[in-house]
Image: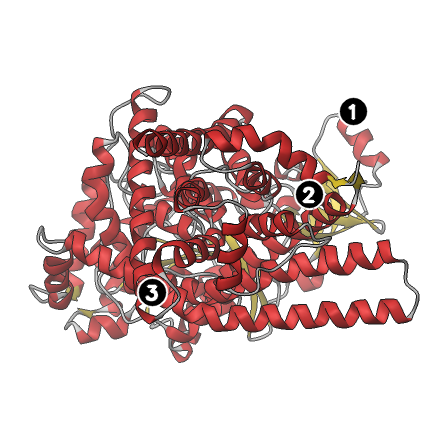
Amino acid sequence: MERVISLAALPIGESGTVTEIREDEAQRNRLAQLGIIPGTVLTCRLRGAGGSPVAFTVRGVTLALRSSQCEHILLKPTASAESGTSARTYLLAGNPNVGKSTVFNALTGMKQHTGNWCGKTVTGAEGSLRFRGIPIRLIDTPGTYSAASDTAEEAAAAEIIRQTPHDCVICVCDATAPERGLRLALELLALDSRVVLCFNLMDEAKKKGIRIDTEALSAALHIPVIGITARDKRTLPPLLEAAEQVSAQAPGKADLPEMTLPQILEKAAELQKSCTVIPPHPHPRTEAADRLLTGKALRIPAMLVLLAVTFWITLIGANYPSAWLSSLFSAVCSGLMQICDQNSVPVWLSGALVDGVLRGTGWVISVMLPPMAIFFPLFTVLEDIGLLPRLAFNMDRSCAKCRACGKQALTMTMGFGCNAVGVTECRIIESRRERLIAILTNALVPCNGRFPTLLAIITVFFAGDSRMGSLRAACMMTLLILLSVAVTFAASALLGKTVLRGQPSSFVLELPPYRRPQLRRILIRSVLDRTVFVLWRAVMTAAPVSLLIWVCANVRVGGISIIGHLASVLDPAGALLGLDGVILLAFILGLPANEIVLPVAVTAYLGTAALTDYGSLASLHALLVSHGWTQLTAACFLLFTLFHSPCATTLLTIHKETRSKRWTAAAFLLPVGIGILLCTVLAGTVRILT
């Protein structure tokens, strides 16, 4: 009897001939109009998240139907689809922090980002590979403790596992803590017998004296059980061989009795006891380090020192490459302007493209790239070691008092790199109410784009440009960060008692063992996943704004540029905040990218026709003082730099995550309102006292 499958089950890249369409007459007529009738050859091209919709080629055109519709279109697969070289779809499932993304990276070479804290993968990632000539589609699902859906990432994992047509599920477990993975494996077996149990981190387990009898487990569960070390690719072929063996089986539930959750837990404990050997204290160094870093005496000082050192390294290391890049772009712009003059290019065109777009974009790159290239690797090291979960552990009590979640500390920390990234990472918070609090307050911590501006003003008005000045600047930067954290907690408490009233939800956080950072992988991931992504976003937003600034600086009305007119209109409001109209205008024009606020102000003060670099800190100080800046102005500027509207990209991300214009508007107004209030109080108090 010839094999017949539905279009929903046709592997990607394979073809089949339509044999029957099990639809009513109206639907069959509609499909016929699209060219889909018995005898038509269809080729599957791709699938959406969860397996739906399905895109396929028919008569030279690519169409897409929901998988529920594709179930009614029956096909006879072509010879290639029926042969042993047909495409396979494997799903990776597992608890958080078991190295699942590392396994995915090792198999596909896709370099999916890895981290040593829960909730890193909040959406499914897809890659491809070939094993013995067989094309394999590999899907990395979010980390989950159960096949039931509780949190946002667990719901996504359950949806992918249940709805995506697949040939095998690879259940990745942590070899240093096997029992928790066995529970998930038993739940997966209740859904589908085509499961391979994979114990990762076998090298760490061996060092800790943990032994796993994979053969005994395989005999007990009637599935392949493989031990690997994902960082050692030589251990991976047996895993793929086992997956290929399992994928040849027909789908169906495993031959296991139905069990309740307590029974599953009891069964997992029984399997661990009979098939593993675990010493009484498998993580002695982790326990000792936790007593030190989470103890009452040192947990706060340790976090402060870590924060100060991170910023000090970032600030010191970024100075020289920033100056070099600035000089490079300046020389390039000057050379291009000479070429334009020699070739009689219209002044308005050369000015708009070179002095406007290129010079402004070059400024953003020169001030952003070096700090990011240092900060993001340092931050990724903290992730890889496992320090970030300890940060959430230490901060949960404070967060709970503010009716928030301790995991908000993680999203705040991500916000130091990029607020848009921090907003996205709020998905790791289970409670919708607490997730909204974290999203609305994330922009209250300064992102990487604000660091150069904060550093420049701190240095020229408060710290001084010397070696000791650099240390003072790092300490002052740390104090500003602490102020932003305190304001974040205060705002969270206010939201938790008003528009987002409610009690703190239960707090569940895994504290993984400390691990050596994978330095090569950290360098690659921090550059590609974060630095390049954030820099590209800044460049794409800065380019049109630079052009707008050039137009406003060059178009004059009554002998005064548009920038001059707008600054005059904003002067009264600026004076109330201890600032001036130029500074307020700079913040408004800097909405697409925080990095250009200070250069916009410099451009307006100088009256130049293009976005202008301040050259040196000494010249910046002289320029600002000549335009009425005092230490009060600088202090108010620092406050407003900390607390003003999120950038355009962050606002778009907030709208995407909340799907609400109201919450997006609230995320805009909250930091602006706080900044206006603090600046007004500071300026008014100083004026009264003096």
Q: Position of residue 573 (x, y in %)?
A: 53, 28
**Secondary structure state at the residue bearing disc 1:** helix
Q: Position of residue 549 (x, y in %)?
A: 70, 46
Query: Residue flagged by tag 3: what amino acid is it?
Result: Gly
Q: Position of residue 409 (x, y in %)?
A: 30, 45
User: Does the image show residue 198?
Assistant: no
How far is mark 2 from mark 1, CA to CA?
18 Å
**Secondary structure state at the residue bearing disc 3:** helix
The one nearer the camera, 555 or 194, is: 555
How far is mark 3 from mark 2, CA to CA?
74 Å
Is 39 situated left or right of 365 in this image?
A: right
**Secondary structure state at the residue bearing disc 2:** strand
Q: Which residue is mark 3?
A: 469
Residue sitting at the far left: 280
The one nearer the camera, 384 or 462, is: 462
Residue drawn where x is 78% and y is 31% of the image: 28
Query: Residue flagged by tag 2: what amino acid is it?
Result: Leu
Is 329 situated left or right of 633 in this image?
A: right
Specify the quadrant of the image occupied by residue 326: bottom right
Is mark 2 in CB contact (under 8 Å) with mark 1?
A: no
Q: Quick check: 334 above or below 594?
A: below
Q: Quick check: 518 above or below 11?
A: below
Q: Which residue is mark 2?
A: 74
Query: Residue flagged by tag 1: what amino acid is it?
Result: Ala
Residue sitting at the far bottom: 234
Q: Residues within 10 Å of mark 2 (few under 14, many from 20)?
A: many
How far is mark 3 from mark 1, CA to CA?
78 Å
Looking at the image, tell me whether mark 3 or mark 2 is earlier in sequence order.
Answer: 2
